[in-house]
Amino acid sequence: MNIKTLSKISILILIPLYIFLNPLLEYINNYGKITYVMDIPTQSFDNDIEITSSNSENVDIINLPKIEKQIVESWVVAYPEVNGNKEIKIFISKVKNMGIDAFIFVKNKNSKVKILSVGPYVDQTMAITMKNKINKLFNYDGKILRITN
């Protein structure tokens, strides 16, 4: 045998030995600790319990507390400097690449202009976090707006 064939054979032996030596040694060292369990689960006895139906006639509906007004509060990040169809499309595509898909238009009370906003978010801290990320990545400074019903 010449040197080329000996080197090829040694490479074919040494590479798998190098790759699989540690897992093989670990398996051999932990052989006594390995357990194989194949227990068939037994039928539980909870199926024998009968469910009784409740009687809804005994519930006093008149004295239940009534909700007078429910306040829904959410937060958006508004970008009033983004205006014009082309600039809005560029902004939306940049922010969508970041992974944000929630966009709404908020009406300004004074000028009745629709402002592009990212959100709504239930938590103000989440809105601040998104504002900071967009400002850091794309240099757009947004304003946090509170939206209520």
Image (cartoon, rainbow, N blue to C red):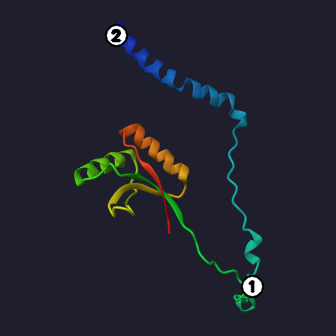
Q: Residue at x 24, y 53 (%)?
A: 84
Residue 21: x and y in percent read 56, 23
The crowding category of the residue bearing disc 1, from other C-alpha atoms within 10 Å (few below 14, some 14 to 19, many at least 20), is: few
Above or below, comparing residue 13 to residue 2 in the picture: below
As drawn, the residue found furthest toward the left would be 86
As drawn, the residue found furthest toward the bottom would be 57
As drawn, the residue found furthest toward the top would be 3
The kind of secondary structure element at disc 2 is helix
Q: Which residue is mark 2?
A: 4
In-image side of 82 versus 22 (left or right): left
Q: How many marks?
A: 2
Above or below, comparing residue 73 to residue 86 in the picture: below
The amino acid marked with disc number 2 is Lys
Q: Residue at x 44, y 41 (%)?
A: 133
- The image quarter in which residue 31 lies: top right
- Looking at marks 2 and 1 on the same chain, the residue that comes earlier in the sequence is marked by 2
Q: Residue at x 35, y 49 (%)?
A: 96
The amino acid marked with disc number 1 is Thr
Q: Residue at x 22, y 51 (%)?
A: 86
The kind of secondary structure element at disc 1 is loop
The residue closer to the viewer here, 141 or 55, is 141
Q: Which residue is mark 1?
A: 52
Question: How far apart, in angstroms, are the residues tagged by discs 2 and 1?
Answer: 83 Å
